[in-house]
Amino acid sequence: MTILSFDRTHSLSALFCLALAVQAPAGATITATARVKGAGGVEASAPVTVTIDRFSSDAERTAIMDALKRGGTGGVKTLLATRDRIGSVQIGSSTTPVKYAYGTPTADGRLITVVTGSPIAFIGAAAPGAGDKTGFDLGLVLLEVATSGSGKGEIVPAAKVKIGEKGEIVTDDYSSEVVHLVNVTRK
């Protein structure tokens, strides 16, 4: 299990923090390129399109946080199963429904956290000795959208989440490989 890196802690705090934030009234379409480098040095990339029909409210953010505190990943998954699709994450030809999308303003743009109610992908699942997929029930997309130019981000395609001993958000990623997003642009 990994305690979030600076980027993930900052991004996930947008998802789970209790401070008020201004929400965008309309949705967004964001494009990027996903890049991952495997342990053997093999690199792969794919186009990514995140479509958000509407952003989640402060009340929805509070409900997600409460579900996380009560039941970890399973609690969040159960809650999201009752929610309508509010967008999609498309990587190559694969599309996963978005159930939660929250944005907060930053000094140079917007920080957007997207949660899918199911995994986006299990990177490395076909490899010999691959780990058990049980409990890796959510997908996370963390986007730093710049006011001008391109931003950056990360995808955690299959994740477990929980509250750590010090109140921090802790993720456990099915894959040990970080999927970076480059050329993040809002259309």
Image: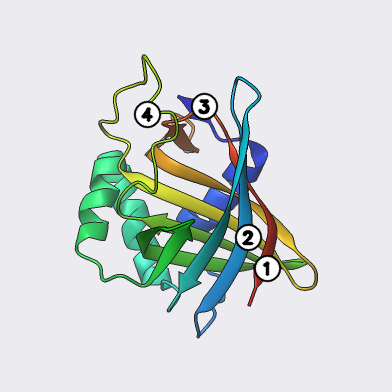
Camera-side mark, 4 or 3: 4
- Which one is earlier in the sequence, the residue at label 1 or at label 3? 3
Q: Which residue is mark 2?
A: 32
- Residue hosting label 3: 176
Q: Amino acid at mark 2?
A: Ala
Which residue is identified by label 1? 185
Callout 1 touching callout 3 (CB < 8 Å):
no
Residue at x 27% of width, y 59% of height: 80
Report the amino acid beneath label 3: Ser
Label 1 or label 2, whichever comes before in sequence order: 2
Disc 3/disc 2 C-alpha distance (Å)? 21 Å
- Residue at 46 percent of width and 35 percent of height: 170
Binning the other alpha carbons within 10 Å of mark 4 as few (below 14), some (14 to 19) or many (20 upward) gives some
Q: Which residue is mark 4?
A: 125
- Dot 4 or dot 1, earlier in sequence: 4
Q: Is residue 102 visible?
A: yes
Q: Quadrant of residue 85?
A: bottom left
Q: For the image shown, how many numbered marks are present on the structure?
A: 4
Label 1 and label 3: CA atoms lie apart by 26 Å
Crowdedness near tag 2: few (<14), some (14–19) or many (≥20) residues, C-alpha within 10 Å: many
Location of residue 42 by image quarter: top right
Tell me how far mark 4 sits from mark 2, CA to CA: 24 Å
Distance of label 1 from label 2 (alpha carbons): 6 Å
